[in-house]
Image: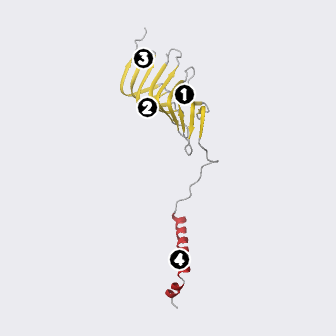
Amino acid sequence: MSLRLWLRDRRLPAATIAIALAAGVAQILLWWFGPAPRTNDFVGPPRSGYTLTDARMTEFNAEGKPSFHLQSPHLERREGDDSLYLNSPTFQLPANQAGVPDWQGKSLYGWVNKSGTELKLQGPVDMRRAAFRDAPAAQIQTADITAWPKQNRLETAAPAQMVQGGTRISGIGMRADLNDKHLELLDDVHATFPPRKR
């Protein structure tokens, strides 16, 4: 009896054995050439979405000092997304200098990324700092700010205006480092400076 006739008489068992051998070879090749299994860095059960009313949040820097305070009448974390969505947030950016008041601000909407390192303030943004020593009160009005609270930096591509005492500076696009008291306007800059007292 030839192999061909033997296989013809036993087609179903022969096909089953051939498929099982092919699947085994394919699995061995997958183990050999396939990527290493990903490590799971997730700890604990998955976090569900939630909504908070009258939420207050404080973020701390590497030294353990508050780097950012945020309040919102409505805060939402959606299922499967670790960022936060805020309605009408108010916030405080610490001055990190003795005797210098914090910046107080508000915007229409806000968003904080998963790690808390980036904040987007959407819609009109109004920031104010109270007067101190010989410096008059300051106000910044702009829109759509991206801020890095741990570094006390912010920027926007929208028109911005800063008023401090009699000084008015306006332009399109702004970068600010609140630690260094450095403000940079990027385009179409106009400024009015009052005369100095002698």
Dot 3 lies on which element? strand
Who comes first in sequence, dot 4 or dot 1?
4
In-front residue for pair 5/168: 5
In-front residue for pair 127/77: 77
Give the amino acid at mark 3: Thr
Could you tell me how far apart the alpha carbons at marks 1 and 2 are, in whole angstroms?
18 Å
Dot 4 lies on which element? helix
Instruction: Name the disc covering residue 156, or none.
Output: 2
Give the amino acid at mark 4: Ala
Give the amino acid at mark 1: Thr
Residue 68 shows in this picture: no
Give the amino acid at mark 2: Thr
Identified at 54% across, 79% down, the residue is 12
Q: Which residue is mark 1?
A: 90
Residue 187 in picture, x, y percent from top left: 36, 28
Identified at 60% across, 32% down, the residue is 53
Residue 144 in picture, x, y percent from top left: 45, 32
Who comes first in sequence, dot 1 or dot 2?
1
Left or right: 91, with 197 as reference point: right
Identified at 59% across, 52% down, the residue is 40
Could you tell me how far apart the alpha carbons at marks 2 and 4 are, in whole angstroms?
65 Å
Could you tell me how far apart the alpha carbons at marks 3 and 2 are, in whole angstroms?
21 Å
In-front residue for pair 134/39: 39
Could you tell me how far apart the alpha carbons at marks 3 and 4 are, in whole angstroms?
86 Å
